[in-house]
Image (cartoon, coloured by chain):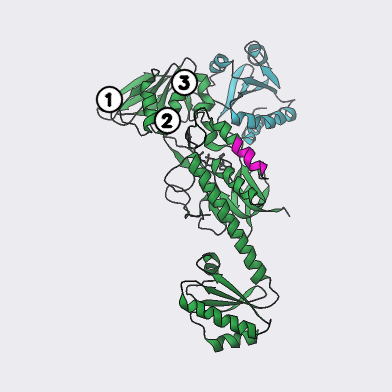
Amino acid sequence: MSEIYDLIIVGGGPAGLSAGVYGSRSRLKTAILQKGKPGGQAATTQDLENYPGFSRGTTGPALMEAMADHAQSFGTEIIREEVVDLELDGEVKVLNGKSGKEYLAKTVILAPGAEPRSLNIKGERALRGKGVSYCATCDADFFEELDVVVVGNGDAAVEEAMYLTKFAETVTIIVIHDEGVLDCNKASAELAFANPKIKWIWNSVLTEIKGDGLVESVMIKNIKTGEITEMETNGVFFFVGTVPKTEILKGKVELNEQGYIITNELMETSVPGVYAAGDARMKYLRQVITAASDGAIAAVAAEKYLAEEEGFKERVLTSQEPVLVAFWAPQVEASIEAVSLLEKKVAEAEGKVKLVKIDTYRNQRVAKRYGITEIPSVVVFKQGEAMGKFIGPLNEKDLMDKINSL
Amino acid sequence: MVELTKENFEAEVLKAEGLVMVDFWSQKCEPCKALMPSIHELAEKYSDKAKFCSLDTTGNKRLAISQKVLGLPTIAFYKNGEKIAELVKDFTIEDVEAKLNELA
Ligand SMILES: Cc1cc2nc3c(=O)[nH]c(=O)nc-3n(C[C@H](O)[C@H](O)[C@H](O)COP(=O)(O)OP(=O)(O)OC[C@H]3O[C@@H](n4cnc5c(N)ncnc54)[C@H](O)[C@@H]3O)c2cc1C
């Protein structure tokens, strides 16, 4: 049988790599499964200027390489593998790789990130790699002395357009808004307006890309007048947002309508022991810093889950003696009374039975698993099996009968 | 694998007989570099079926564009000097092998 990891992370972008740093530094046996080279989308942008502590001049690929080295320095294994299927419900999670290998883990962090959205304009698909591109870093140098068009006007669009001016002769940005209105940050907008190589077409959208084997021209529609004009160009770069890479997660964890993974503040998904981090998650801001932050939280939450699960197993499920598990909460008076009664009774039983207290305020997972809806409650375990349940205020006689019957 | 340049492209690819595979790549293209070891394995495995070449597009941009390559990674197949098939951007090594089997 293959070895079982404490933590497997799917995806080696900034979210997965920072989860790797935190996981392996807490001495969890940690692996990242990453299709191709680590770094994610962040490794596809040259100008990365807003990761605190790393100012102008920092490149995406360099920052991501540093993150990967950092994670590996604490013992994270980075394995080149594309995850194609997952079995997440059991205590041990199974991940199937495209190579045919199977990976086992006690906890999983899903950090598959996102990929560029395509608009499915006529010609877009057919001319991909023939002048149509979604990655300036990858393809910019083909366009030296040529003319390109950029579609989009958010941060990525305007910043990548600026990068393209280092190669292309002209960069024309097609903007759907009125003249002067951009969705990007003000600093980038000012720089772009001052850049002589950047031209602007306002109130417009792209309707078609034409070319025989290579991009030759685009059709641009003015949404105010309805007028369509043809413009010659050699390349079209799309930066119109991203879509989450969560196709393989459908039916495995809860996703929202757009396919983003739904989590709580602890990055917990709908499945116990499974967490999500980064751009694939439903959240407000998708950037390197928030991806890294998610990864840190998810790894710490996974570590706490492991400690709790292992503690429960050791103290309750594998105990020689029968165990009374008391579910209580510090703010529920009746549950404090129940606990002290139990402590007395267990002491009287002189080692025939053990007591384990679970603070449901801190650990809701175990309570949920055993269907505890009311505090106090007691579940009686013998040889790892739940033998009986007492919901609500304790009846001393019933409890004693149960203890004596064990 | 034959390393192609502006100087030898015509002789090695366009004037060559039989099946020729050309791997267009560059230092900056991470997916290209990730594919490379497996491409070399295929070159060994199919050495009697096709000729395997690679072209670093850095410094050979015009040549790449003349072959209608304007994005990486691209793998093109030529037969008797004519381009007969091409894989562009999101393809896997399995796709390359399938294409080789289909054409060889
Ligand atoms: C052009 C561009 C410019 C940007 N500029 C900036 C910027 O200046 N500043 C900033 O803060 N942010 C920027 N961003 C956003 C930033 O890159 C993302 O927010 C960040 O990379 C998200 O990190 P992530 O780890 O969640 O996902 P990703 O970076 O998308 O990484 C996910 C990784 O998981 C891998 N993966 C997916 N599915 C699987 C699978 N099934 N098996 C194995 N591996 C898998 C992918 O290959 C990928 O490497 C930019 C994005 C783009 C596209």
Q: Is there one chain holding both mark 1 and mark 2? A: yes
* Dot label at residue A227: 1
The answer to whether A368 is drawn above or below residue A274 in the figure is below
Q: Is residue A372 left or right of residue B36?
A: left
Other-residue count near label 2 (Cα within 10 Å), few / some / many at <14 / 14–19 / ≥20: many
- Which chain appears green? A
Q: Is residue A140 above or below residue A389?
A: above
- Comes first in the chain, label 3 or label 2: 2
Q: Tell me the CA gap for discs 3 and 1.
A: 24 Å
Residue A136 visible in the current orientation: yes
Residue A266 location in percent, x, y? 50, 55
- Location of residue A346 in the rendering, given as x and y in whole percent from the top left corner: 62, 82
Q: Which residue is mark 2?
A: A157
* Kind of residue at badge 1: Glu
Residue A212: numbered disc? 3
Q: What amino acid is at disc 2? A: Ala
Question: The disc numbered 3 marks a residue on which chain?
Answer: A
> Does mark 2 have its CB less than 8 Å from ligand 1?
no
Q: Main secondary structure of the magenta part?
A: helix
Q: Give the image location of residue A335, x and y in percent.
A: 50, 77
Magenta-highlighted residues: A66-75
Q: Which residue of the protein is positioned furthest toward the left in this rendering?
A: A225
Label 3 is placed on what type of residue?
A: Asp
Instruction: Say if mark 3 contacts mark 1, CB within 8 Å.
Output: no
Inspect the magenta stretch and tell me whether residue A70 lies in it: yes
